[in-house]
Amino acid sequence: MPRNPSTGVYSKPAGTTPSVGQVIDPAPWNALTTDLGNETTVSLPRDDSGACGRSGTNKPVIVPQIGDLLVPRWRGAKTTGSEAPFGAVDDHFILDCHLPPIQRRSSMLKRLVKQVLPSSAVAAVNNWRTRERLYKSWSKAAAAAPAYGDMRLTAFRIERSRRLIGEEKSYVQPPADLLPAMDIPAGRFVDFGGSAGEMCAVLREQYPAWSFTVVETKSMADAAQALRPEISFSDQLPPEFDVFYSSGTLQYLSDPETLWREALSRTTRYAYLARNSFSNRKLFTVQSSRLFDNGAGPVPDGFDNVEIRYPHQTISEASLTGIADEMGFDLAARFEGRNSGVTGTRADVYGADLLFKRR
Ligand SMILES: C[S@@+](CC[C@H](N)C(=O)[O-])C[C@H]1O[C@@H](n2cnc3c(N)ncnc32)[C@H](O)[C@@H]1O
């Protein structure tokens, strides 16, 4: 059963899917899950009676549910539930042992071919097989993963950010190319998707006469307000502002183009988009990360480095530039090769920072 080395997720994008909770014959399953060696896997939160995996015994295997965690357990040992998970069962999780014999033989053939192919060819095939899944629409991707406001993620990011108070500039730097946009003595700055206000805190030191508003998910805005009271937090755009800034955020919205249009209608001077995920093709995916990859600074105690998933979509650079033009903005500068907002494995996704100026 192939495991995606970066996400740890087991998936098998071929064959037929047995239904959740179905009891299946463990013998072929055990033969197929050879990569687990002497370990057994248990799907959590089920207990042993709901075990899925290479039991090495004739114990029936029960098909786990999407999202269940697969944890290692040595033969004969009891699971405590605190073992580090191999990964979660995703929506491709399909068991070969349920296949009719003819398909089972083809699966064996595939393994044989794998043994004789050069490792570069096997790697190429594996890359292709483990490429991220595309969804037909935002709503289909959103149905497969919760939106960004997940409480566990918010709680972690707030605790992490708490440790940075007063030291934000050691961890977060505003892009130097943004600063020419702050060319008036006092103005109103909006950071859309600005987390717990770390970047605004850095800018505020440099521009004390400016006011700063972070627009965030409701859970983030509510929690962050107590953390940095000198910055305003809201889940709504203010009626008017001088500079609109957004970094690595539009790609997580259900309708980024509408938000962009709305933001520009309220912007009097400049708009800067950083950490973009551009593509000429609309690609709807589910991004997967580890909890500790979210935010900056030392990791607070009391959290497990669990998998976090949220829906994601690419945006057409041309459509953003076109909307800006309609809204009375010129592209003042374009910075190539800014790729830190690019996620996933698709070659046609790229980044570039864009600075727009009202005509
Ligand atoms: C990848 S993070 C980027 C954080 C930061 N701007 C940066 O560049 O490092 C995406 C941010 O978008 C925020 N976000 C997601 N959906 C949002 C929404 N509907 N409205 C406002 N912020 C949102 C998330 O909470 C998160 O802070």
Image (cartoon, helix red, strand yellow):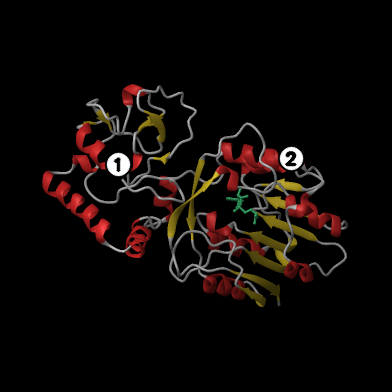
Residue 10 picture location, percent across and down: 37, 45
Say which of 179 and 239 sits in front. Answer: 179
Q: Residue at 66% across / 41% down in the picture?
A: 299
Q: CA distance from mark 2 to mark 1?
A: 45 Å
Compared with 12, 27 (above or below) is above
Q: Earlier in the sequence, mark 2 or mark 1?
A: 1
Q: On the picture, is 26 further left or further right than 128? A: left
Which of discs 2 and 1 lies nearer the camera? The answer is 1
Count of picture labels: 2
Q: On the picture, is 46 further left or further right than 264? A: left
Rendered-image quadrant of the C terminus: bottom right
Q: On the picture, is 257 further left or further right than 23? A: right
Name the residue that disc number 2 marks.
Answer: 162
Rendered-image quadrant of the N terminus: top left
As drawn, the label of residue 78 is: none
Say which of 15 and 115 sits in front. Answer: 115
Q: Residues within 10 Å of mark 2 (few under 14, many from 20)?
A: some
Q: Secondary structure at mark 1?
A: helix
Name the residue that disc number 1 marks.
Answer: 34
Res 346 quadrant in image: bottom left
Q: Secondary structure at mark 2?
A: helix
Residue 356 appearing in the image: yes
Residue 312 picture location, percent across and down: 49, 55
**Hey, what amino acid is under mark 2?**
Arg
Q: Residues within 10 Å of mark 1 (few under 14, many from 20)?
A: few
Q: Residue furthest left?
A: 102
Residue 132 picture location, percent across and down: 40, 56
Whether ligand 1 has any atom under 8 Å from the Cβ at mark 2 is answered as no
Q: Residue at 23% across / 39% down in the picture?
A: 31
Res 242 quadrant in image: bottom right
Residue 124 picture location, percent across and down: 36, 63
**Hey, what amino acid is under mark 1?**
Thr
